[in-house]
């Protein structure tokens, strides 16, 4: 009984999927809704590579639902055409050359449309065939991730079908950029052996991303690209063949400030021997990676921030004992960060927005100027904190241009008081003292007196007349932000909210002070201590109420 009831429920929703222009045949599919599912399409349809295949689907109850669209071959999903189609019932699918190369030009393809919220609600189109256009060029070698060495050859293979000419042209590209025409005209005989000449690769260097284009001489609109491949020099080893660097490899891309592992092998490796690793660019040594490291076959290296983007880097290895113990890696790419993610902030009107109490990491390159702005509120106290790896020129100003402060240093902690709602603009300028990029962090803190209480005296720690008592401003765990008060502070004694006396002034802001309470002090539990910055009178904290009791 339960099985029959479930079967009735699962056959209740109708999904009609139509390949536009096709109306033949019906395929039944189960669903998990309130109606059964029916799919309509034309049988034995043929779609050519490069064509656009319109897809449409409808629901009998007219309700729109979000769907996923997939390409199937037989009962297997081979490609997701759309992860999510929202609030519509039509989509287009371009049959690409890449898809045809991967899954073949055969019959038995189908389109599946399924509900995002319930994968059991789905429908298939009728099967169709993917075929190459009667006039087409299909390149099937080199394939993705192939690597070819300078002064060697590579095999280019293609199929040219129905061309009006027996000749094709071959060109070399780096991604979408034309480098040169390799062969102006050659027979359409499906293959060509091409010599890898260094002259072809000067512009983009030894790297990945290269591909060949084969096009019809008679009709340049008929063409195809190979998969991308890499060009490299053969890994350099000593004449003895006993030393090899296996990583980085051709086509590898390393990012500055990210750890990477250099790997090498040697029959002479031992814990008591060492190796030197150096970095080369364009075949020339530009810096030492490490002068001495254990010759154990691996070393973790973090490329520094001042390395520029390039694709002609190499690692060189040298054994500490054997003069012949040298090797070089293949060429690889380093991606620098000559410009940080805030690089559009070189003018005041383009200032980067920095929220209060958040931190940003920036880079200041030679001849660079960075602007950072922070909205500030009237009556609040703020501290600008900047830490740089080298000297920078810093200027802070209000929105109307009024100077707050300026300095040339590598470390800044400056506190100011906002009299009105405004914007604090911080400008960082490279001093030009070196040609190095200077990383720095910047933060604008809002002072919160609640976060930095006076610990003593307190309700649990009363003062006694005729005895020494301690006022503890900040304990060690809170000392990191005590510089907001400046170098010195003044201390006042209050009773019932009214100032009684000035305890001391120009006290060194080191977290404690000692003083003797006069013997004639009125006994009470309504006393408070007020700590005031000598540099910024608006900056103060009050202790909790405490008692003065007899000794």
Image (tube, rainbow, N blue to C red):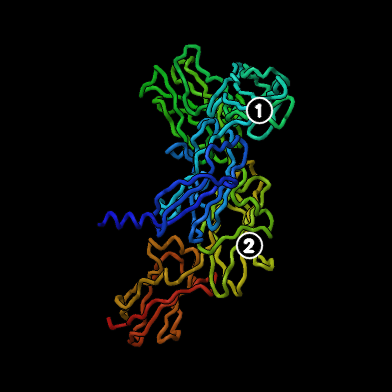
Quick one: 508 or 208, which is closer to the camera? 208
Residue 387 in sight from this viewpoint: no
- The image quarter containing residue 407 is bottom right
Image coordinates of residue 385 in percent, x first then y, are 53, 59
Characterize the local packing of mark 1: few (<14), some (14-19) or many (20 or more) Cα atoms within 10 angstroms. many
Residue closer to the observer: 266 or 285:
266
Which residue is nearer to you in this view: 48 or 79? 48
Looking at the image, residue 448 sits to the left or right of residue 519; the answer is right
Please tell me which of labels 1 and 2 falls first in the chain.
Answer: 1
**Real-space Cα separation, disc 1 to disc 2, in angstroms:** 52 Å
* Residue 205: % across, % down: 63, 28
* Residue found at the very far left of the displayed protein: 1
Q: Nearer the viewer, residue 130 or 321?
A: 130
Whether residue 169 is visible: yes
**Quadrant in the picture for the C terminus:** bottom left
Label 2, secondary structure: give it.
strand
Picture coordinates of residue 358, whole percent (x, y): 51, 60
- Residue identified by numbered label 2: 425
The residue under the point 57% across, 36% down is 46
**Disc 1 target residue:** 213
């Amino acid at each position: 009984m339960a099985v029959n009831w479930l079967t009735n429920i699962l056959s209740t929703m109708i999904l009609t999927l139509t390949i536009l222009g096709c109306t033949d045949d019906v395929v039944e599919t189960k669903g998990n809704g309130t109606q059964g599912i029916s799919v309509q399409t034309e049988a034995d349809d043929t779609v050519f590579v490069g064509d656009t295949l319109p897809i449409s689907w409808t629901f009998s109850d007219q309700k729109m639902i979000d769907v996923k669209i997939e390409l199937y071959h037989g009962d297997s999903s081979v490609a997701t055409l759309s992860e999510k189609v929202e609030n519509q019932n039509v989509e287009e699918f371009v049959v690409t050359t890449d898809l045809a190369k991967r899954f073949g030009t055969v019959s038995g393809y189908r389109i599946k449309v399924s509900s995002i919220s319930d994968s059991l609600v789905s429908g298939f189109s009728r099967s169709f065939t993917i075929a190459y256009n009667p006039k087409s060029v299909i390149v099937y070698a080199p394939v993705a991730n192939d690597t070819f060495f300078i002064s060697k050859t590579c095999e280019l293979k293609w199929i040219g079908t129905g061309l009006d000419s027996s000749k094709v042209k071959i060109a070399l590209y780096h991604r979408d950029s034309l480098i040169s025409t390799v062969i102006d005209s050659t027979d359409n005989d499906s293959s060509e052996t091409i010599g890898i000449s260094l002259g072809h690769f000067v512009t983009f260097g030894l790297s990945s991303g290269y591909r060949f284009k084969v096009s019809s001489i008679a009709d340049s609109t008929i063409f195809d690209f190979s998969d991308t491949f890499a060009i490299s020099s053969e890994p350099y080893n000593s004449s003895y063949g006993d030393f090899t660097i296996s990583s980085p490899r051709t086509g590898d891309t390393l990012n500055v400030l990210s750890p990477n592992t250099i790997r090498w092998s040697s029959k002479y490796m031992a814990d008591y021997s060492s190796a030197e690793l150096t970095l080369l660019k364009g075949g020339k040594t530009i810096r030492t990676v490490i002068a001495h490291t254990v010759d154990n076959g691996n070393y973790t290296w973090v490329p520094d921030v001042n390395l520029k983007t390039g694709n002609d880097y190499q690692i060189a290895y040298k054994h500490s004992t054997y003069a012949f113990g040298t090797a070089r890696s293949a060429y690889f790419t380093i991606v620098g960060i000559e410009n940080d993610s805030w690089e559009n902030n070189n003018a005041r009107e383009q200032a980067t927005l920095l929220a209060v109490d958040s931190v940003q990491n920036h880079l200041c390159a030679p001849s660079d100027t960075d602007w950072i702005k922070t909205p500030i509120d009237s009556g609040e106290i703020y501290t600008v904190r900047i830490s740089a790896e080298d000297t920078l020129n810093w200027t802070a100003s209000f929105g109307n241009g009024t100077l707050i402060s300026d300095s040339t240093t590598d470390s800044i902690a400056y506190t100011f008081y906002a009299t009105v709602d405004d914007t604090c603009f911080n400008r960082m300028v490279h001093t030009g003292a070196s040609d190095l990029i200077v990383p720095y962090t910047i933060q604008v803190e809002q002072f919160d007196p609640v976060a930095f209480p006076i610990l003593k005296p307190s309700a649990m720690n009363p003062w006694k007349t005729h005895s020494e008592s301690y006022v503890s401003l900040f304990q060690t765990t809170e000392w990191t932000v005590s510089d907001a008060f400046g170098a010195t502070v003044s201390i006042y004694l209050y009773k019932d909210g009214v100032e009684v006396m000035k305890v001391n002034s120009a006290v060194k802001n080191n977290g404690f002070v000692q003083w003797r309470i006069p013997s004639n002090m009125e006994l009470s539990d309504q006393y408070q201590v007020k700590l005031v910055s000598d540099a910024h009178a608006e900056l103060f904290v009050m202790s909790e109420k405490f008692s003065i009791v007899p000794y």
